[in-house]
Amino acid sequence: MQKDNLSLRLATPADVGAIAEIESLCFSHPWSEEDLLGGFDNFTLYFLAEREGETLGYCGIQALSGEG
C-alpha cells in the first residue's frame, strides 16, 4: 500500500532494530530486540510504515487460539 510516499510492508527480522528503536521511544518497558525476534517464530506478523526508507511506525499482530 502506498499513499503520499508512505508505504506499508511486512517486516522481516532485519527490521528488528528499527522496531526496537520505536519501542524504546514509546514505552517505559520496551520489548527487547530478542523478544521482538521471537515473535517472527511465534505466529506474529509485524508491519512497517515507511517513507523514503525511514521507518515511521509499526504494528504487530499475533494469532493465538484462533484470535488476532
Image (tube, rainbow, N blue to C red):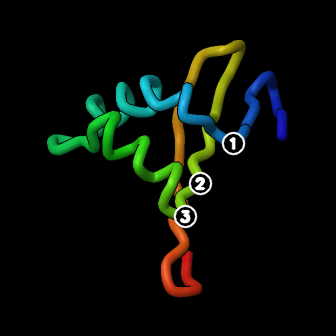
N-terminal label among 1 and 3 = 1
Residue 10 tag number: 1
Residue plotted at (42% across, 24% down): 17
Q: Answer with left or right where residue 39 lies relative to residue 35.
A: right
Q: Between residue 53 and residue 12, name the one nearer to us.
A: 12
Residue 45 tag number: 2
Residue 61's image quarter? bottom right
The alpha-carbon separation of the residues under discs 2 and 3 comes to 7 Å
Residue plotted at (51% across, 65% down): 62
- Amino acid at the residue labelled 2: Leu
Q: Between residue 46 and residue 12, name the one nearer to us.
A: 12
Badge nearest the viewer, 1 or 3: 3
Helix, strand or loop at disc 3?
Answer: loop
**x and y percent of residue 53 in the render?**
67, 14
Helix, strand or loop at disc 2?
Answer: strand
Residue 43 tag number: 3
Q: Between residue 19 and residue 26, name the one nearer to us.
A: 19
Q: Answer with left or right where residue 46 lies relative to residue 3.
A: left
Mark 3 Cα-neighbour bin, 10 Å: few <14, some 14–19, many ≥20: few
- The quarter of the rendered structure image containing the C terminus is bottom right
**x and y percent of residue 51 in the render?**
68, 20
The alpha-carbon separation of the residues under discs 1 and 3 comes to 14 Å
Question: Looking at this rendering, what residue extends furthest in the left direction?
Answer: 28
